[in-house]
């Protein structure tokens, strides 16, 4: 009886310790079973119901298999290998639907020095959504989540960020997200389009000028570096800065000092730098069109943004979000036939091109629903070769046809993955294994 009382008392102390953590937190065993959880976790993921004894993935993912079986990184699994805290970005299900969650797993060691359990702390980043939004980052595809995890890690620091990827992938939105999650979020976010700065304007626009510095300078002008004081300076398309101007930018970043055009006194700069480009800066360095020293100064923390074709699972969500941006509160929907056409298209212009296509379709549609006939001709037959059924006399391997159909089904079906697996006649584990192979093949493709 005394042992039972001691065990009960230890459990109460453990719950009390967990309740002192301001975020959702829980203790799990090696078999993924929840041993204890604080009130924040129970309220966020189980509406206050008891979760002890249940599997963590059942509670947070509403699934029947561990997170690593659906293509997510399992922080507990990584922690078991490294014996140190490990972080991962997951999509969890709570009272408000699915949300991105930043999960950190900590090893709990027993008296024998071996890991006996794991403490997981869950934080909800307010930087991206898995539901439609007109002006926020949205997505839940693995490629998007990998990018978002890098954003989560670097944002609270002062480290400079270099955003890489094709045009139209949303680099400015990602830069704003980094700014919002940083300690500088209350200060200005100043975007600069470097492709529009020529030699004559560069110093004046960036550093400002004094009255009378040159013909037409009738008054003192505050430069963009001044405007970003205490905040974030976002240099978009930095690969377009002419070679002769790169040395001036490098001097600013190395000395954090500058002078307005026509001034004698030096001023101190205070901003966090984020750069972006669709160019291959490494190739430009080798070709001598981009300074090597500037490249290493700005490329401390590169983040590659995935192209739209690499995150096609997000296509329905992106369409709904862009329709919100185009039409505001006016309800617009897209028919399955139009979504299937978009899914088969290559999107060389990425999300920016998708926005243009939808805006055009809205103008051509007399009703609230967008259909295939409202899409331009380039969406039909001139995009990707990955159609569901092959055309002509070409014979394709069955596994290739299966992969294409599964990609199409993932983009079209808006319900949970367990229901989709059932509709496809697959066991859940088989379904997740096939999806993981497709995603790995897509991510490794050039």
Image (cartoon, rainbow, N blue to C red):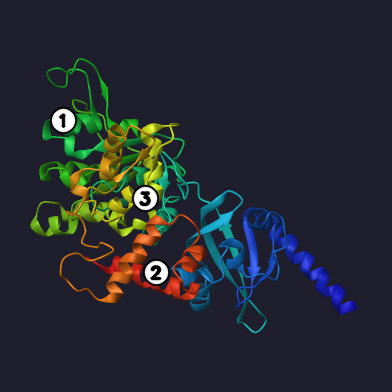
Other-residue count near label 2 (Cα within 10 Å), few / some / many at <14 / 14–19 / ≥20:
some
> Farthest right residue?
1
Residue under label 2: 435
Seen in the image, is 303 located left or right of residue 420? left
Task: Please tell me which residue lies in front, 254 or 102.
Answer: 102
User: Which circle, 1 or 3, is nearer the viewer?
Assistant: 3
Of the numbered discs 1 and 3, the one sitting upstream in the chain is: 1
Of the numbered discs 3 and 2, the one sitting upstream in the chain is: 3
Q: Residue 431, percent across and down?
A: 44, 71
Seen in the image, is 201 located left or right of residue 116? left
Do tag 1 and tag 3 residues touch (Cβ < 8 Å)?
no
Seen in the image, is 244 located left or right of residue 6? left
Q: Which element carries disc 2, helix, strand or loop?
A: helix
> Which residue: 33% across, 71% down?
402
User: Which circle, 1 or 2, is nearer the viewer?
Assistant: 2
Q: Residue 152, percent across and down?
A: 44, 54
Q: Is residue 249 visible?
A: yes
Task: In the rendered view, tell whether residue 390 sits above or below residue 250.
Answer: below
Q: Which element carries disc 3, helix, strand or loop?
A: helix
Of the numbered discs 1 and 2, the one sitting upstream in the chain is: 1
> Farthest top residue?
218
Q: Residue 44, percent across and down?
A: 64, 53
Label of residue 45 in the image = none
* Quadrant of the rendering where the C terminus is positioned: bottom left
Residue under label 1: 201
Task: Please tell me which residue lies in front, 33 or 289.
Answer: 33
Q: Is residue 231 visible?
A: no
Label of residue 336 in the image = 3
Q: Which element carries disc 1, helix, strand or loop?
A: helix
């Amino acid at each position: 009886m005394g042992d039972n009382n001691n065990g009960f008392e230890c459990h109460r102390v453990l719950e009390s310790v967990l309740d002192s953590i301001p975020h959702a937190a829980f203790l799990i065993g090696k078999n993924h079973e929840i041993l204890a959880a604080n009130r924040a976790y129970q309220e966020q993921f189980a509406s206050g119901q008891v979760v002890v004894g249940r599997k963590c993935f059942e509670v947070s993912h509403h699934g029947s298999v561990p997170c690593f079986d659906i293509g997510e990184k399992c922080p507990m699994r990584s922690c078991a290998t490294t014996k140190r805290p490990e972080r991962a970005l997951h999509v969890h299900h709570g009272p408000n639907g699915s949300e991105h969650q930043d999960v950190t797993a900590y090893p709990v060691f027993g008296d024998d020095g071996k890991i006996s359990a794991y403490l997981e702390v869950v934080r909800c980043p307010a930087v991206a959504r898995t539901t439609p939004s007109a002006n926020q980052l949205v997505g839940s595809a693995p490629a998007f989540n990998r990018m978002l995890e890098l954003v989560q890690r670097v944002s609270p620091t002062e480290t400079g960020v270099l955003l890489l990827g094709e045009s139209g992938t949303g680099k400015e939105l990602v830069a704003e997200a980094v700014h919002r999650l940083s300690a500088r979020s209350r200060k200005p976010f100043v975007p600069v389009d470097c492709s529009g700065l020529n030699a004559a304007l560069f110093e004046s626009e960036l550093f400002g000028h004094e009255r009378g510095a040159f013909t037409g300078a009738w008054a003192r002008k505050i430069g963009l570096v001044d405007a970003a004081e205490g905040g974030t300076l976002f240099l978009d398309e930095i690969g377009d800065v002419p070679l002769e101007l790169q040395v001036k930018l490098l001097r600013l970043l190395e000395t954090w000092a500058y002078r307005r055009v026509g001034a004698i006194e030096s001023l101190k700069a205070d901003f966090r730098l984020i750069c972006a480009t669709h160019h291959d800066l490494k190739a430009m360095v080798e070709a001598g069109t981009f300074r090597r020293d500037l490249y290493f100064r700005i490329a401390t923390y590169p983040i590659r943004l995935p192209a739209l074709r690499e995150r096609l699972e997000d296509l329905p969500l992106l369409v709904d979000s862009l329709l919100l941006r185009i039409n505001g509160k006016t309800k617009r929907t897209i028919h399955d036939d139009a979504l299937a056409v978009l899914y088969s298209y290559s999107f060389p212009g990425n999300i920016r091109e998708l926005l243009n296509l939808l805006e055009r379709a809205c103008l051509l549609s007399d009703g609230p629903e967008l259909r295939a006939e409202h899409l331009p001709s380039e969406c039909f037959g001139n995009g990707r070769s990955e159609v569901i059924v092959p055309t002509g006399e070409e014979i394709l391997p069955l596994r290739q046809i299966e992969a294409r159909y599964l990609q199409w089904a993932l983009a079209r079906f808006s319900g949970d993955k367990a229901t989709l697996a059932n509709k496809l006649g697959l066991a859940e584990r088989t379904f997740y294994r096939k999806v993981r192979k497709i995603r790995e093949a897509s991510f490794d493709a050039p």
